[in-house]
């Protein structure tokens, strides 16, 4: 598996002060009774102030695990970070003692989760949950925390916020609940917001509202955002760059426009083709054949080769390096250029 | 919530009449001559027989007569008069003497379950699969596997008689120390169940999504566990302990019997053994009320603890 170490890739030039957040060749495995699953196999990406990076991939591709590793909230066991760095403002978070790590959590980097109903504590009122961060971390008084919680709920456009402080999570609609979640994440004014599939559990119309809200907040508060999703439709308007993950690796990394125009990895290409299109009514939906690999037994060579339509002998033997394409993009495919230039969709 | 309580109270009325009727029927249906049973071995004069027949409406026969006597009994009961036992003592007085003892015993048992069961359960849940977790699993299985009828005499023999750490039996008016060993024996079963329940609940809640959220807020682990996890984990435990307290209040026949504690269970058992119909029916009627009320309290408590529970 590791006959070719995947190198950190310069998708955009490093600014003089370094990136705000940078992952370098992160490896994470899950050690379970049945064996070791290699969940993250050399992920590198970075984030600069004020930008939005979309991390795209199917379930099990490792996008959420990477995010939880950044937050330092992976459950260990079974998760073990075996190598790599997570650098925030030049410090490697992985080497920090837990107490310092905790200071970063929520204050510098905050996270919102997929299903707000289960991600919020069911037995505490939402006002209490938003205020808890303020009281515990900033030492705010009860009344100050209450006032600030109302402000935060106003910020995420929850109507009649002051009257809803005492309501419990189950008394909110799905969209409103996700707004509570966002308000809670914003409490400490983080510089980085990680949104882990923030709209997956929501209706399509509500999805759009939440995405708009996130985009507005990101702009107005000048946060950097990592948007984790499996929905290509969601990211197009919001993201600056996209990193596509497959079997615990970044397989393609590009700016949104180029990626949509000409994907340079067969997997990305497959994902784009599987979006149902209104102008093509006939026939079945396009899918990528096969299933994502079992992470306890990732195929040798390129992990995508059993499902790839461009597959050649070299794909079975050699793990592809990240190929740097001319326009500052990378693709972990031996035939990245050919794929990019193959416009037959 | 108000409507729920009203409806439950109405249901309780039905349940009360139903259970007292059944117990009354079972206790008196099989009896041959109630007057002779009352008198025991002594001869009964014709005048006494006529008086008692008149007093207890024994001249009415068949199903009609049975209900006549049942409603007699119920109307006395509703006036607060539990009647007299066959030994001529007021059942109300017997219960007034027995209940404080049983309540003391029940409180000791529940305290044992809370202090040891819940604490050990929380620790075992946090350190899942540790030596401590496995040791408590083994011990609780052992305790749950031994019936009280075995455990109580064993404890009495070793701790009371052989090593003399506790009084082997308690007298007519037992103090706290005399009730301690029976309380521990009685509580050990609740302790074991409370421990397993707490352990499972804590382990489950530790994996919940909201715990991940709490950690991502940058809260210290201590606070995540002691506030977020515990508040959720203890909902089923408190419900269980509430029901358990209701059960214990109705007396522990075996434990009270073994340690000779003059509580409710002890008197109930004596009533059954001596075929003292009025005593048995009197105690059971009151137990039914205690049980119904404690269940209602637990249901209301459940809604208070878990805001997601709404009673219509």
Image (spheres, helix red, strand yellow):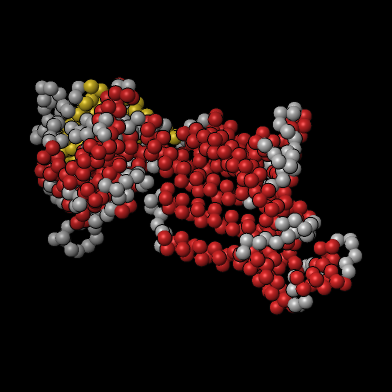
Please state, as top left, top right, bottom left or bottom right, where the N terminus of chain B lies in the image: bottom left
Can the viewer see residue A307 in this picture? no
Please state, as top left, top right, bottom left or bottom right, where the C terminus of chain B lies in the image: bottom left
Q: Quadrant of residue A12?
A: top left
Q: Quadrant of residue B109?
A: top right
Q: Nearer the viewer, residue A157 or B115?
A: B115
On the picture, is B41 further left or further right than A144? right
Percent from the top left, x then y, of residue B66? 71, 73
Can the viewer see residue A223 in this picture? yes
Q: Nearer the viewer, residue B87 or B192?
A: B87
Percent from the top left, x then y, of residue A137? 27, 30
Percent from the top left, x then y, of residue A14? 13, 25
* Above or below: residue B25 compared with residue A204: below
* Above or below: residue B53 compared with residue B125: below
Q: Nearer the viewer, residue B59 or B63?
A: B59
Please tell me how many numbered marks the rendered image carries. Answer: 0
On the picture, is A200 further left or further right than A239? right
On the picture, is B311 further left or further right than B31? left
Residue lying at 72% horizontally and 46% vertically, measured from the top left: B262
Residue lying at 34% horizontally and 28% vertically, measured from the top left: A81
Q: Nearer the viewer, residue A110 or A293?
A: A110
Residue lying at 32% horizontally and 46% vertically, measured from the top left: A125
Percent from the top left, x then y, of residue A7? 22, 26
Residue lying at 16% horizontally and 27% vertically, measured from the top left: A19
């Amino acid at each position: 598996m590791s006959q070719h170490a995947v190198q950190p890739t310069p998708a955009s030039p490093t600014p003089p002060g370094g990136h705000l957040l940078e992952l370098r060749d992160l490896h994470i495995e899950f050690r379970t009774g049945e064996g070791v699953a290699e969940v993250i196999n050399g992920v590198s990406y970075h984030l600069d102030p004020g930008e939005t990076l979309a991390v795209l991939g199917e379930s099990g591709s490792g996008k959420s695990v990477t995010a939880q590793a950044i937050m330092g909230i992976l459950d260990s066991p079974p998760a073990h970070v075996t190598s790599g760095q997570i650098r925030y403002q030049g410090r490697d978070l992985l080497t920090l003692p837990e107490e310092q790590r905790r200071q970063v959590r929520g204050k510098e980097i905050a996270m919102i989760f997929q299903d707000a109903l289960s991600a919020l504590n069911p037995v505490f009122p939402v006002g209490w949950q938003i205020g808890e961060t303020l009281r515990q971390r900033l030492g705010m008084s009860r009344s100050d925390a209450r006032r600030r919680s109302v402000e935060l709920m106003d910020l995420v456009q929850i109507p009649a916020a002051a009257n809803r402080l005492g309501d419990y999570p189950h008394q909110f609609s799905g969209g409103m609940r996700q707004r509570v979640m966002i308000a809670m994440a914003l409490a400490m004014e983080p510089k980085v917001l990680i949104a882990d599939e923030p709209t997956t559990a929501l209706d399509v119309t509500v999805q759009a509202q939440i995405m708009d809200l996130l985009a507005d907040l990101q702009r107005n508060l000048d946060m950097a955002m990592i948007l984790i999703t499996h929905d290509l439709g969601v990211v197009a308007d919001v993201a600056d760059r996209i990193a596509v993950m497959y079997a615990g690796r970044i397989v393609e990394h590009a700016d949104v426009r180029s990626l949509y125009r000409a994907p340079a990895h067969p997997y990305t290409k497959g994902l784009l083709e599987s979006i149902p299109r209104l102008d093509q009514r006939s026939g079945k939906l396009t899918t990528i054949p096969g299933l994502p690999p079992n992470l306890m037994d990732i195929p040798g060579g390129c992990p995508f080769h059993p499902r790839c339509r461009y597959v050649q002998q070299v794909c079975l033997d050699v793990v592809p390096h990240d190929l740097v394409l001319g326009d500052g993009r990378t693709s972990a495919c031996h035939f990245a250029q050919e794929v990019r230039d193959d416009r037959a969709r | 919530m108000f409507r729920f309580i009203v409806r439950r109270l109405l249901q309780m009325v039905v349940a009360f009449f139903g259970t007292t009727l059944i117990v009354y029927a079972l206790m008196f249906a099989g009896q041959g001559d109630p007057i002779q049973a009352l008198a025991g071995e002594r001869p009964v004069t014709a005048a006494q027989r006529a008086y008692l027949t008149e007093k207890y409406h024994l001249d009415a026969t068949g199903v009609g007569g049975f209900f006549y006597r049942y409603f007699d009994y119920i109307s006395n009961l509703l006036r607060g008069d539990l009647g007299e036992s066959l030994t001529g003592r007021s059942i109300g007085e017997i219960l007034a003497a027995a209940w404080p003892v049983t309540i003391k015993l029940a409180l000791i048992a529940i305290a044992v379950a809370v202090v040891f069961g819940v604490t050990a359960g929380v620790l075992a849940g946090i350190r899942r699969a540790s030596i401590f977790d496995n040791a408590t699993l083994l011990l609780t299985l052992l305790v749950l596997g031994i019936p009280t009828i075995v455990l109580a005499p064993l404890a009495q023999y070793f701790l009371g008689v052989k090593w003399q750490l506790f009084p082997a039996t308690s007298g007519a008016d037992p103090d706290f120390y005399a009730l301690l060993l029976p309380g521990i024996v009685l509580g050990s079963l609740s302790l074991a169940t409370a421990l397993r329940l707490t352990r499972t609940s804590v382990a489950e809640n530790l994996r919940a999504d909201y715990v991940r959220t709490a950690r991502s807020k940058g809260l210290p682990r201590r606070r995540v566990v002691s506030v977020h996890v515990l508040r959720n984990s203890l909902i089923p435990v408190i419900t269980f302990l509430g029901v358990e307290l209701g059960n214990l209040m109705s007396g522990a026949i075996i434990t009270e019997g073994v340690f000779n504690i003059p509580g409710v269970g002890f008197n109930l058992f004596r009533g059954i053994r001596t075929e003292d119909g009025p005593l048995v029916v009197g105690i059971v009627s009151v137990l039914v009320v205690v049980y119904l009320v404690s269940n209602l309290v637990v249901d209301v408590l459940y809604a208070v603890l878990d805001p997601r529970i709404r009673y219509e």
